Amino acid sequence: MIKSASLSDHVADKEDIIRQLHSCKEALLACEKVRLRVSGEIERIINKMSINGVEVEHGRHIKALPQVPNLDDDASTFLINIKRTIACICHLAPLFLPLPKRDNNLDHLKKSIGKLSNERHSTLLAAIDQFCPGSKHLIELRNYQEHPGELRTHVNNFSITANNEISYPVWFVSGKPPEPILASMNAAVDFAISLCETLLVHLIFAAMETKIPYFVQEIPDEDMESKLPIKYRLSIEISER
């Protein structure tokens, strides 16, 4: 899609854009590696408890539960890399638009693009805006883990609740509801992929200066090649008007 687009002169070399996309991919693959490891450990423990049950004392109180090994380290590694992924995606913007600097998060990026021209880039800004809450949440999980104070990120392994029930691994920022770690990791990876695809498409259109009527064609999941899972294709509108 990038190679076929007719872009403005101020846009960076297309190979630079592709290299930045590879950086996004590498950060996301690091997240996926951790996600798969944590998923495998949680599934193993759940299967073990389903088959063997759990130890109880006095006939009713659950004793110590199996634990996901190195969960704190894996949670930290995942959050570091999902934050890095978001920053890498944000760094695509200066390659397409005449921005004075690189922004590491969507809130700052939105402000930088808004200074160029709110009217011209209103569609791009609206697209970014819908991802800001999710991006902020993931970054806060990492920031409050790295710099704990009154607020901090909690990472809890398998545990026993006050009602003597089993709680799966969760993480949360102080004062916020706990989130199942595995479901949150799954959602974060999907979020980052969607953010990258959406921002890339909007940046391409924002940087195009051509009268050729391009349109974006979404490729159905069942038609994507497994070795080259391209979700969108840039095509030329040739129908009569």
Image (cartoon, rainbow, N blue to C red):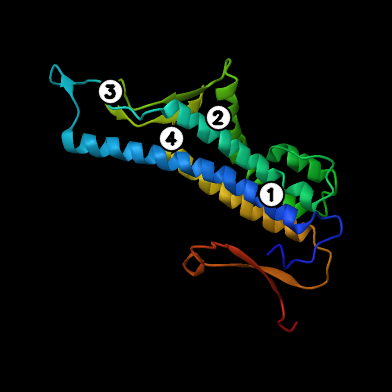
Element assignment for label 4: helix
Q: Earlier in the sequence, mark 2 or mark 4?
A: 2
Query: How many C-alpha atoms fall within 10 Å of the one at disc 1: few (<14), some, or many (≥20)?
Result: some
Q: Residue at x 56, y 19 (%)?
A: 151
Q: Is residue 164 above or below residue 81?
A: above
Q: Which amino acid, mark 4?
A: Ile
Q: CA distance from mark 4 to mark 1?
A: 29 Å
Q: Earlier in the sequence, mark 4 or mark 1?
A: 1
Query: How many C-alpha atoms fall within 10 Å of the one at disc 4: few (<14), some, or many (≥20)?
Result: many
Please identify the quadrant where the N terminus is shown.
Answer: bottom right
Q: Residue at x 35, y 30 (%)?
A: 68
Left or right of 156, for residue 90? right
According to the picture, the residue beneath numbered tag 3 turns out to be 163
Residue 61 horizontal/vertical position (percent): 20, 20
Residue 38 horizontal/vertical position (percent): 40, 37
Q: Which amino acid, mark 3?
A: Asn
Q: Are marks 2 and 3 in contact (CB under 8 Å)?
A: no
Which mark's residue is nearer the viewer, 1 or 3? 1
Q: CA distance from mark 1 to mark 2?
A: 25 Å
According to the picture, the residue beneath numbered tag 4 turns out to be 181
Q: CA distance from mark 4 to mark 3?
A: 21 Å
According to the picture, the residue beneath numbered tag 2 turns out to be 141
Q: Are marks 4 and 1 in contact (CB under 8 Å)?
A: no
Which mark is on residue 20?
A: 1
Q: CA distance from mark 2 to mark 3?
A: 27 Å
Q: Which amino acid, mark 1?
A: Gln
Residue 162 horizontal/vertical position (percent): 30, 20
Q: Residue at x 48, y 44 (%)?
A: 32
Element assignment for label 1: helix
